[in-house]
Amino acid sequence: MSRVLIIGCGGVASVAISKCCQVPEVFSEIMIASRTKSKCDALAEKLRPTTKTVIETAKVDADKVEELIALIGAYKPDLVMNIALPYQDLTIMDACLATGVNYMDTANYEPEDTDDPAWRAIYEKRCREKGFSAYFDYSWQWAYRERFERAGLTALLGCGFDPGVTQAYCAYAKKHEFDTIDTIDILDCNGGDHGYAFATNFNPEVNLREVSAPGSYWENGHWVEIPAMSIKREYNFDQVGQKDMYLLHHEEIESLAENIPEVKRIRFFMTFGQSYLTHMRCLENVGMLSTTPVMFEGHEIVPIKFLKALLPDPASLGPRTHGKTNIGCIFTGKKDGQDKTYYIYNVCDHQACYKEVGSQAISYTTGVPAMCGALMLLTGKWTAKGVHTVEEFDPDPFLDALDRYGLPRSESHDPVLVD
């Protein structure tokens, strides 16, 4: 019996909330809070007839620590699930420390204003020292490690699919399949078709910033950075087919390199169609992906925010998206002195997700792991204090929960490797 505050009410949060309501014996009470209370109210009204979970709603500005502290202090949850934007990770972590409550999120911190001089100075120093230039990294949240440990609290970072489940797959491979892991390739394939000429499957600001950034991978103890979309491979994905995929920077590479230090190389690939890439390059070339404000007819606007207003809401893609996703990890390494390969992955059907919770598979594959991660914390399966990523915990109960609640694993012991 637990009380949980869930911050956010977008596509991913709606899935996580719906799945929490399927486990009322653990999530006995939840509060949904966001800037737009009417969205929270609408979701609560939809779910109340289907669950024994007691649902409340509230309005909160997650950029304001004082508002968060007041809400957490009044509701007194056992856990705060941050399923808002990664821009708000730090303010919510601050509020959890102030109120003595455990914390979790689905993506690591990145700033909304990348032109802020104070942030930029720290960012440029990190670029020089670490060797990659993506705007998102774990350093801001890892800086909270000692404070959460001293407070006897747990902060679980990046408990979506990638990051999140992919890290649990790595921990599982290390625990059960290998004595030592040499290489990890994380493959994220979306074989879905929503029928639009161009749309993003999650928040456009975050998605387009991530995709347009230089790619990077971990090799022999250091970062290798490459121009965006400059490394392309093809792969034949189970139940999806042959797809083009491109090497990107992704946050779980950073934590995996720290927590599985014997790994010689870690790469992340994501599939994209040519239409998506053509649209993205055009938008980037004309400045529409910029976060720097510009004046337009006497008003200051941020180009990428204006673009977000023009694009379809990712939460609206569910009824029109068909096809499947396939996300997983391919490993090479050694077991009992012998070379070994292993592939663990999940296949998720867009229309099956929509039928169950009214969402496309991209939101589903992030929202379900968020619920399962909360389940691990609330039931005492994961108890380490401090700030941690998913691969630092026992993967077995987490993967068992994913199998049960909608994201079952598949395995291959003789996979085709990525060259």
Image (spheres, helix red, strand yellow):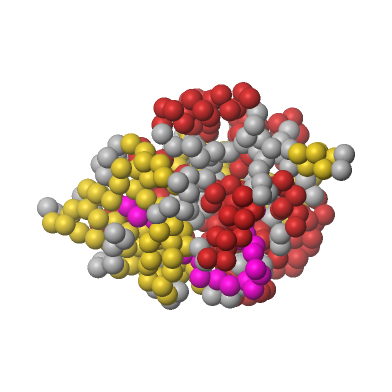
Q: Which residue is drawn at 22% across and 48% down?
A: 180
Q: Is residue 16 left or right of residue 402?
A: right
Of helix, strand and loop, which mostly describes the magenta segment? Answer: loop
Q: Is residue 190 magenta?
A: yes
Question: For residue 112, what is the image quadrant?
Answer: top right
Q: Does the magenta stretch include residue 302?
A: no
Q: Is residue 227 left or right of residue 276?
A: left
| Extent of the magenta region | 184-204
Q: Which residue is drawn at 67% across and 40% down?
A: 291
The furthest residue to the right: 298
Image coordinates for residue 319, horizontal then vertical, percent:
67, 73
Q: In this view, does 107 lie to the left or right of 58?
A: left
Image coordinates for residue 358, horizontal then vertical, percent:
66, 69
Image coordinates for residue 298, horizontal then vertical, percent:
87, 39
Vertical placement of 134 versus 189: above or below?
above
Can residue 41 be seen from the camera position used here?
yes
Question: For residue 108, what is the image quadrant?
Answer: top right
Vertical placement of 94 versus 317: above or below?
above
Image coordinates for residue 324, horizontal then vertical, percent:
51, 72
